[in-house]
Amino acid sequence: MEKKTPSELLTPPEYYYLQIFKEDVVYKTRSDYCDIRRHKNKTKKDESEESSRGRIQEFSKKSKYRLIHQLRNSQQTFKQFITLTYPKDYPMDGAIVKSHLNTLLTRLRQEFSGIHYLWVIEAQSRGAPHFHIIINQAIPTKKKIDKDGQYFYSECWSKRWSKITGNEKDKHHVRRGFRIDPITTSNGKKLASYMAKYYSKNEQKEFAKDFINIGRFWGATRGFTQPIVQGVYCASELKWMLKLCFHYANLERSKAGLKRYAFDADRGCSIWGFRKIFFEKVVPLFGDRLSRPYKDLEKPPTLYG
DNA sequence: CGGACTCATCCGTGACATCT
DNA sequence: AGATGTCACGGATGAGTCCG
């Protein structure tokens, strides 16, 4: 029998799940959506059964990519940059640290309705964990100046944070543990590159070996980043449109001296910096089809819906 | 051909959200 | 503040790609 090439073995997808974000376009291929709903019928967890999934160990490249993707495409305008730190003594358990963070974030959500935030955990050079949070609302602050320059201070929130961490008596921690900086740029792309740079500068600083239960390295509110358009489409209808997308994207990339995207309509891909091309070149030709998502799955399926 | 690397997909863990 | 419900991040996986 004749040997089949890999592309012949791969069954072509029937549907695309398309998401158009502020800056980037993402499409995923699906043969069907039944697998997504599998969670629903899952039987109760068997304690003795061992899971194949390991614990989170590091801030992976992939995770970093998604973080930047969220920041670039968020429709929020960011007002403040908060830094949470611990005093000299700090917990060596990620679960404790995260519960502190969670308490604070819950307070924020309660106080500022409609707030959106994105947090990132990081190790300081001394090995202590600290958090950066960007928020789309402004906590009222007073401007202060000390030997390190000017900074913004909220007495109420500083006290809350030191109380949560159990350091309310530590005057220095109350004063320095909760730092607020206003964000001047509203440009998501700039902010993303700033955060990414900030991170790469610090990534050598690892958590101490005996720091346990690190857990996730970043998180955001739901709805922090939402697509402008999303839907499920028949693959046959969108294939040519995607090809055109890649063509224009590659023209731009060649001009900029970047590596061309390899076009493969049978595998998912995200096309960065593509919104402009999408609306200028693609929508005029394919807008009609885009306005008609696959009829039985107009909305992307939810896990439990 | 084969090792090193890249990347999309799957699904369990861990985080957000809501209710009490 | 804890319990419960829902969502989504990221480890594991395996196919694809690059390079010698």
Image: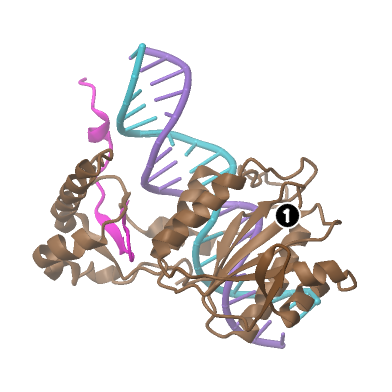
Chain colours: A brown, B purple, C cyan
**Which segment did they paint magenta?**
A1-29
> Where is residue A297 shown, x and y percent of the image?
30, 68
- Position of the N terminus of chain A, as image quadrant, is top left
Identify the residue at horizontal 51%, vertical 50% (top origin).
A197
Asked which quadrant contains residue A158, the reply is bottom right
| Closest to the observer, A239 or A298 | A239
Farthest residue toward the left? Answer: A285
Q: Is residue A7 magenta?
A: yes
Residue B7 as seen in the image, left or right of residue A285: right
Identify the residue at horizontal 59%, vertical 58% (top origin).
A218
Residue A228 as seen in the image, left or right of residue A240: right
Chain to which mark 1 belongs: A
Q: Is residue A157 magenta?
A: no
The reply to whether residue A166 is visible in this rendering is no
> Is residue A247 positioned above or below A227 on the image?
above
Residue A158 as seen in the image, left or right of residue A171: left
SS for callout 1: strand
Farthest residue toward the front? Answer: A147
Asked which quadrant contains residue A237, the reply is bottom left
Badge 1 amino acid: Pro
Disc 1 designates what residue? A129
